[in-house]
Image (cartoon, helix red, strand yellow):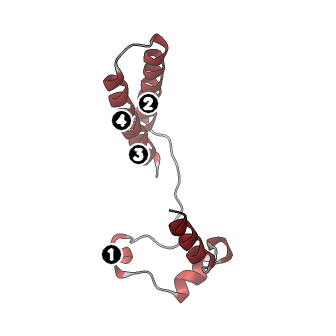
Amino acid sequence: MAILVLSATSVMGQQYPTHELIFENTIKLTQPSSFFTFFNQLPADFMIKIGVNLWSVVLLLLAALLVFTMLFVFVKRQKVSLMVICMGLILAVVSYVAVMISII
């Protein structure tokens, strides 16, 4: 295990850190792969914006309700671990969808 970590560290040490490269120069000097350009039709200066709409607020409220329900089940120490696992999975999906919907 240690050999894998040390070999990965040595490979990473030979490359320039990403903060030392300017994004525009990197794209100009090395073209992105055809697989990337097939799926990504966005311009290089595209900015992600987060907006609030009705669905994102509803989903975030549902996520908060799931969190409080899970905490209530933990405080009551009920033997419903399958229910808590299912609520956790639903919480992850609902939170992800809420964030994805709020991106403009």
The amino acid pointed to by label 4 is Leu
User: Closer to the N terminus: mark 4 or mark 2?
Assistant: 2
- Label 1 sits on residue: 38
| Closest to the observer, 11 or 87 | 11
19 above or below 95?
Answer: below
State the separation of the CA atoms marked 3 and 2. Answer: 14 Å
Determine whether 92 is above or below 32 in the image: above
Q: Which residue is mark 3?
A: 101
Separation (CA) of disc 4 from disc 2: 11 Å
N-terminal label among 4 and 1: 1
The residue under label 2 is which amino acid type? Ala
Residues at badges 4 and 2 in contact (C-beta under 8 Å)? no
Circle 4 is placed at which residue position?
Answer: 89
Please name the amino acid that badge 3 sits on.
Answer: Ile
Task: Determine whether label 4 and label 1 are within 8 Å by CB.
Answer: no
- Cα distance in 3D space between marks 1 and 2: 34 Å
